[in-house]
Amino acid sequence: MIHDYSRFFSDCVLCPRRCHVNRAAGQLGFCRMGDHISAARAALHMWEEPCLSGKKGSGAVFFSGCSLQCIYCQNREIALGKRGWELDEEKLAQVFLQLRDKGAANINLVTAAHFAPPVAEAIRQSKRQGLCLPVVYNSGGYEEPDTLRLFDGLVDIYLPDFKYMDPSLARAYSHAPDYPEAAEKAISEMLRQTGECVFDDQGYLQRGTIVRHLILPGHTRNSIAVLTRLFELFGNRIYYSIMNQYTPIADAPLEDDPGLRRRVTRREYEKVLDAALALGIQNGFFQEGDTAKESFIPAFNGEGLQIRL
């Protein structure tokens, strides 16, 4: 059964931008999406943290549109809403079940906030049809707590970013000077829902919150400030994923900051890792080797979305 979500979409406040546009009538807010789910790929994804992908792969569904649209985004093609295939909640539920049948370790919702009400219903429908995998909510961290509460009891694992403590960077790179405050509130709600991390006997995460931080070239001070604030607020109740995989994208609008046209150096990465250890961070993941490759970006070609009911 298809539900009516007009009360959410006719005056949209699903993300902290609170655009108040009528998406049900075709108006577009910052995310550039209408009132129907749009996604660009649903497939096994091997490049998440080891406790999520492992050898099985994470069943990742990449949704179109985004409430941040960072100027350096690797998934820029879909973040801008330029590519996507329309789904309703019944078809999305079948996508989840199809990923389960392919052997996915979990169902991974990548940037789903602006479609939260029907996505939450799709999770319910898939669970009624036998889905028993952990559900991962994978986001940029710029979330509205009331929207996250729509997933309470449905999402098992939260995987947000915490990108910035410096509001000026948040404004310049993600058009969101309120990002630090919004991310703190969002992660507090996520941790309230999940509690501390729980792993199975194979090392796969079953419940909990992992917070990612992508180091930006030339901005280690921001990175250390992010980790310091996270540890002040949450200590070792969360896991930390400290990433060096920043990849300059050829068509990204980086004219105002040419420093973003290079990768993070080994020295920069080690400086941030040293700060994490000095803070007392015990639970975490770091990256080794050359992870800054465009080949890590999947093809947004509609794979896994051709569902017939």
Image (tube, rainbow, N blue to C red):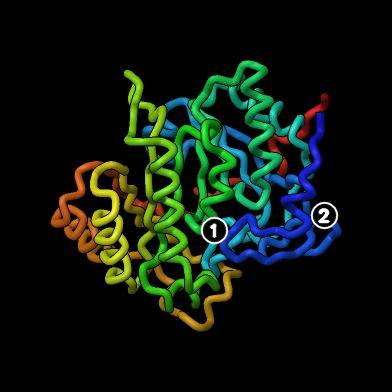
Q: Farthest left residue?
A: 278
Give the percent coordinates (x, y) of residue 206.
Answer: 41, 27
User: Callout 2: few (<14), some (14-19), or many (20+) C-alpha neighbours within 10 Å?
Assistant: some
Q: Nearer the viewer, residue 222 or 3?
A: 3
Residue 24: mark in rendering: 2
Tag count in the figure? 2
Res 61 quadrant in image: top right
Q: Quadrant of residue 200?
A: top left
**305 lies left or right of 289:** right
Q: CA distance from mark 2 to mark 1?
A: 29 Å
Query: In screen coordinates, is 185 left or right of 155?
Result: left
Q: Contact (CB < 8 A) between labels 2 and 1?
A: no
Query: Compared to 133, does 291 lie above or below?
Result: below
Res 197 → quadrant: top left
Toward the bottom, the furthest residue is 256
Taking depth in this image into account, of 154 and 290 the one nearest to the observer is: 154
Which amino acid type is marked by label 1? Answer: Gln
With respect to residue 76, does 171 lie above or below? below
Q: Residue furthest top?
A: 130
State the SS at label 1.
Answer: loop
Where is residue 67 shown, x and y percent of the image?
60, 61
Query: Circle 2 — which element?
Result: helix
Residue pointed to by mark 1: 74
- In primary-sequence order, the first of circles 2 and 1 is 2
Q: Residue at x 78, y 29 (%)?
A: 307
Query: Which quarter of the figure is the C terminus placed in?
Result: top right
Front residue of this view, candidates 183 and 253: 183
Look at 67% across and 17% down and name the residue there: 129
Pointer 1 local density, CA inside 10 Å: few below 14, some 14–19, many at least 20: some
